[in-house]
Image (tube, rainbow, N blue to C red):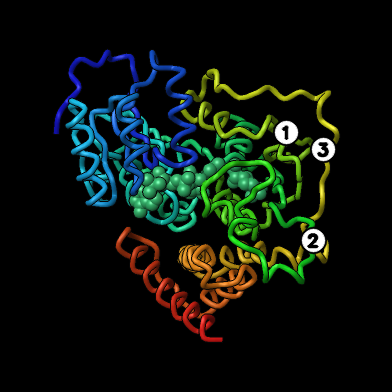
């Protein structure tokens, strides 16, 4: 593998995993504003050769990797034709190797789904600064993943907007959190169906589900926001990131997505983080922590805000609209491995919904079914997690096939 010997020691070298996605492109936008501080060392993606080729021209990384072999070959030919000396690698293993590359200082983990677990883990085990957008990695890996971060001296910075908000609202000394914190309150927009008649949810289309009112995101997380499974995954993510009891985690619906989340302290005081809904803010914070850098985000104009409103997720209509929410606590209170099972079920359910093989309302039914019927196992290695994920996926696929027959 080739080495960047001419890199000034002061520039941090970043690997952006999932560079062609929503988080990946926002990350590159922030990095482009700070070329004197960070250098793009590696870019990785799945299939999108056109965008990856453009990113390679602009950022000239030492390495580019595509999960898909054919895409990698195509990229190699394109870059050669342009005279760019970028080493192109292929496959999941190469992506994990780049995440752990000795010349990498920081890794943006922005692959969607459990596919991002192995490279995020590789970065953690190599002791990197790990900027974690890929919430599924933590939902699957749970306390074991956090233990790997600790054991290998990695620094984990949350990128998910709510968790970045919580992190920004907590004292720097983590050892004080248990004594000081009463509750973590995650805000939720309620997604595109917050006011939809629950009786009509069976008919919604992928396009409607992906039309998030406040954020422009990839299709998987957009569907998760529409079912509020995104918030369920975030409750699980918060439990492991901040090592809280599940009962200390609460969700409040806040349709404007201005308050990104809050910490309630034992004296009743609440500290919140606010801003315009722009992922470049948590990304910039993940890159620069404990410093602050320009993110490019518009500043919040309080005078232009009509109102900040809140709704209880316990309202009967919201309970009907968003049954997925309670699966977070069900999985957290279940045996070890339950959150990995729930994640696998949900990935199959969302993909099937996007392919129009499953109704929107069946996402909850599938998730609940697999969580109930899949037997959890110990979560103590990547291989064990992968096996559990496969087992849950098999059960979920059977459910989809049966649902298609009805
Ligand atoms: N978007 C957002 O604002 C937020 C996202 N997140 C989380 O960040 C993660 C990324 O989300 P988002 O950017 O929206 O997703 P996108 O779908 O926009 O992007 C996903 C990225 O992962 C790549 N990818 C997909 N599958 C694989 C695979 N099997 N192996 C390697 N790379 C793969 C894609 O490559 P390609 O397209 O080239 O195939 C793309 O670069 C998710 O876990 C999400 O929950 C969290 C908070 C906010
Ligand atoms: C930007 C981000 O972090 C997303 O997870 C966002 O929070 C989705 O919004 P809701 O899930 O609250 O609709
Ligand atoms: Mn979020």
Which of discs 2 and 3 lies nearer the camera? The answer is 3
Q: Between tags 1 and 2, which lies in front?
A: 2
Measured in 3D between alpha carbons, the distance from the residue under mark 2 to the one under mark 3, in whole angstroms, is 19 Å
Q: Nearer the viewer, mark 1 or mark 3?
A: 3
Closer to the chain start, of discs 1 and 2, is: 1
Q: Is residue 131 above or below residue 39?
A: below
**Residue 336, visible in the rendered structure:** no
x and y percentages locating residue 234 in the rendered image: 59, 51
| Left or right, residue 356 beside residue 315 | left
Q: CA distance from mark 1 to mark 2?
A: 23 Å
For the residues labelled 1 and 3, say whether their Cβ atoms are less than 8 Å apart. no
Q: Is residue 372 above or below residue 195?
A: below
Left or right of residue 372, residue 384 in this image:
left
What's the CA distance linking mark 1 and mark 3? 16 Å
Q: Position of residue 139 (x, y in %)?
A: 49, 56
Helix, strand, or loop for circle 2? loop
Disc 1 marks which residue?
271
Q: Which residue is mark 3?
A: 308
**Mark nearer the N terminus (2 vs 3):** 3
| Quadrant the N terminus occupies | top left
Q: What residue sits 44% from the left and 17% below the top?
A: 34
Which residue is at 59% across, 66% downward?
Answer: 333
When asked about the image quadrant of residue 203, the answer is: bottom right
Task: Look at the image and tell me in which quarter the C terminus lies.
Answer: bottom right
């Amino acid at each position: 593998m080739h080495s960047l010997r001419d890199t000034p020691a002061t520039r941090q070298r970043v690997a952006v995993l999932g560079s062609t996605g929503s988080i990946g492109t926002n990350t590159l936008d922030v990095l482009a504003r700070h070329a004197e501080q960070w250098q793009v060392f590696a870019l990785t993606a799945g299939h999108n050769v056109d965008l990856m080729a453009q990113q390679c021209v602009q950022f000239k990384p030492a390495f580019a990797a595509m999960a898909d072999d054919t895409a990698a070959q195509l990229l190699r030919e394109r870059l050669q034709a342009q005279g760019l000396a970028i080493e192109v690698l292929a496959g999941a293993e190469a992506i994990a190797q780049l995440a752990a590359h000795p010349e990498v200082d920081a890794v943006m983990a922005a692959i969607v789904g459990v596919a991002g677990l192995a490279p995020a883990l590789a970065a953690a085990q190599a002791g990197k600064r790990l900027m974690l957008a890929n919430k599924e990695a933590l939902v699957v890996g749970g306390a074991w993943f956090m233990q790997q971060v600790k054991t290998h001296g990695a620094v984990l910075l949350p990128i998910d907007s709510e968790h970045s908000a919580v992190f920004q609202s907590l004292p720097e000394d983590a050892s004080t959190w248990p004594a000081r914190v009463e509750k973590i309150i995650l805000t939720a927009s309620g997604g595109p169906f917050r006011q939809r008649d629950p009786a009509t949810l069976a008919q919604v289309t992928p396009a409607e589900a992906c039309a998030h009112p406040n954020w422009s995101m990839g299709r998987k997380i957009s569907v998760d926001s529409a079912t509020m499974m995104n918030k369920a995954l975030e409750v699980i993510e918060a439990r492991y990131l901040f090592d809280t009891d599940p009962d200390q985690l609460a969700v409040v619906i806040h349709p404007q997505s201005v308050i990104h989340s809050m910490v309630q302290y034992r004296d009743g005081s609440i500290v919140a983080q606010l801003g315009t809904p722009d992922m470049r803010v948590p990304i910039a914070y993940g890159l620069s922590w404990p410093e602050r850098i320009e993110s490019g985000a518009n500043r919040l104009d309080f005078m232009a805000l009509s109102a900040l409103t809140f709704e209880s997720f316990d309202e009967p209509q919201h309970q009907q609209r968003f049954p997925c929410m309670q699966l977070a606590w069900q999985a957290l209170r279940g045996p070890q491995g339950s959150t990995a099972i729930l994640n696998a079920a949900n990935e199959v359910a969302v993909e099937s919904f996007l392919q129009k093989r499953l109704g929107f309302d069946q996402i909850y039914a599938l998730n609940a079914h697999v969580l109930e019927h899949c037997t959890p196992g110990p979560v103590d290695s990547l291989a064990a997690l992968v096996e559990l994920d496969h087992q849950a996926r098999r059960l979920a696929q059977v459910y989809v096939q049966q649902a298609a027959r009805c």
